[in-house]
Image (cartoon, rainbow, N blue to C red):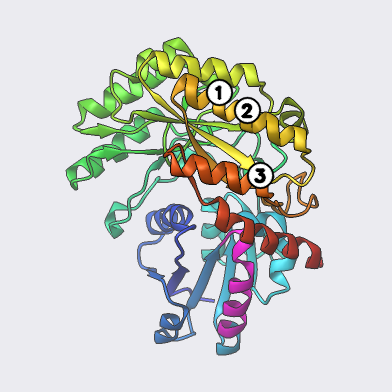
């Protein structure tokens, strides 16, 4: 088919992936119309001939996507999809009526789709052969689409609850420093003078193993951004976080010369050593505490991620986590960002069952919230966890 336009089904959870795909398509073939829609009914304003509708979605969005795909398919549109859920269960998504699906990295395969190179099984494999980030722009200023620059992709760890290693691979790839500076310079020229970044572990940028920090490389990056006119730099905070074992004295001395953020987001996930081992976090409570000690020492406020409601945690595990949180709040002035466990497809814990919060959880987390020590979407995520569990139980491939 001759593609005249891509319509991207925009949601609050897919704007980063859509921006990367728009950038790849526009830099490859500028005569294709690129449109974002926030309401599925707006798609009907465009003729079906030459139109491709693209979805990128999370597992908890599946029911909505299922309804919209059926609606659009009946109207005659060509549908394609990618994202975390598709990478985990591509055959399930094809069964919903999608014409082609994309697993893993999408920048190169969307170009193959444009060129009419279609796989027989209708699954574009972006996991076997990973892209080189330097070959693709991080955003699309021509379409006024900017986002935090993805500086690294991939994670060497295998946390049992996380889709990232399955979506982005276990070998960490870094975007070249020169390219980050080049595109940031374009942003500055267009009034974008705030720098934020996307990375599974910000402090690992430039690292060969994705864990051990390279302060000299990060110093060069942040200095370069300031030199081209970036006014504010937010590093090690939303939309990224930092693994505790990557927080070192030298790293903090490096970034505090440049950054504007007072918070550093640290992934801890539990205060029970037993749970940390079950979920394959790869670090200890001692390493978490050492990281928080260093953050406080250098004037940063730790914002620590915890996951609550693991189906396999005991009362003892819950109490240990509560005690650990009370300790770090008091000792290191930590703030807690709370999540409820979701059994995401394609992860080792996909069949563990939905996260469930007990009365103890509600009482403890409510009290922390009232005192200003806790935030997060843990209440809503408990509902989403049940929805995701239903997706797993009803999956047919």
State which tag comes first along the sequence, 1 or 3: 1
Quarter of the rendering occupied by the C terminus: bottom right
Asked where in the image residue 144 lies, by quadrant, the reply is bottom left
Residue neighbourhood size for the residue with mark 2, other residues' Cα within 10 Å, grouped as few (<14), some (14–19), many (≥20): some
Q: For the point 55% across and 23% down, which residue is it?
A: 327
CA separation in Å, label 1 and label 3: 18 Å
Q: For the point 67% across and 55% down, which residue is it?
A: 87
Percent of width and height locating residue 112 = 56, 59
Asked where in the image residue 134 lies, by quadrant, the reply is top left
Q: Give the number of marks.
A: 3
Residues in magenta?
57-72
Q: Is residue 70 covered in magenta? A: yes
Discs 1, 2 touching: Cβ within 8 Å: yes
Quarter of the rendering occupied by the N terminus: bottom right
On screen, 378 above or below 77?
above
CA separation in Å, label 3 and label 2: 13 Å
Percent of width and height locating residue 318 = 70, 36
Q: Name the residue under label 1.
A: 327
Tell me the element at label 1.
helix
Discs 1, 3 touching: Cβ within 8 Å: no
């Amino acid at each position: 088919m001759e593609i005249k336009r891509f319509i991207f089904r925009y949601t609050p959870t897919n704007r980063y992936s859509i921006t990367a795909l728009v950038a790849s398509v526009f830099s490859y073939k500028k005569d294709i119309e690129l449109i974002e829609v926030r309401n599925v009914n707006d798609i009907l304003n465009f003729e079906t001939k030459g139109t491709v509708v693209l979805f990128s979605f999370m597992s908890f969005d599946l029911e909505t996507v299922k309804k919209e795909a059926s609606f659009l398919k009946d109207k005659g549109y060509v549908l394609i999809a990618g994202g975390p859920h598709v990478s985990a269960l591509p055959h399930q998504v094809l069964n919903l009526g999608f014409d082609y699906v994309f697993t893993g990295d999408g920048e190169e395969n969307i170009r193959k789709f444009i060129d009419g190179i279609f796989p027989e099984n209708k699954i574009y494999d972006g996991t076997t052969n990973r892209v080189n980030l330097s070959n693709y722009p991080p955003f699309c200023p021509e379409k006024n689409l900017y986002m935090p620059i993805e500086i690294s992709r991939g994670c060497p760890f295998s946390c049992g609850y996380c889709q990232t290693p399955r979506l982005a691979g276990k070998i960490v790839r870094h975007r070249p420093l020169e390219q980050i500076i080049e595109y940031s310079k374009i942003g500055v020229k267009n009034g974008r003078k705030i720098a934020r970044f996307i990375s599974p572990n910000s402090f690992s940028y430039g690292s060969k193993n994705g864990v051990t920090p390279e302060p000299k490389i990060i110093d060069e990056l942040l200095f370069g951004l300031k030199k081209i006119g970036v006014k504010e730099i937010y590093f090690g905070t939303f939309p990224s976080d930092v693994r505790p074992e990557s927080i070192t004295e030298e790293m903090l001395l490096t970034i505090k010369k440049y950054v504007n953020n007072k918070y550093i987001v640290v992934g801890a996930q539990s205060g029970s050593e037993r749970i940390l081992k079950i979920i394959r976090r790869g670090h200890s409570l001692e390493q978490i505490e050492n990281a928080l000690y260093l953050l406080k020492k250098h004037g940063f406020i730790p914002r620590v991620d915890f996951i609550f409601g693991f189906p396999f945690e005991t009362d003892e595990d819950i109490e240990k986590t509560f005690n650990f949180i009370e300790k770090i709040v008091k000792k290191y002035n930590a703030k807690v960002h709370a999540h409820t466990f979701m059994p995401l497809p394609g992860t080792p814990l996909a069949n563990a069952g939905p996260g469930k919060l007990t009365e103890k959880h509600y009482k403890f987390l409510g009290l922390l919230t009232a005192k200003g020590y806790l935030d997060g979407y843990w209440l809503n995520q408990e509902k989403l966890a049940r929805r995701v569990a239903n997706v797993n139980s009803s999956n047919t491939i």
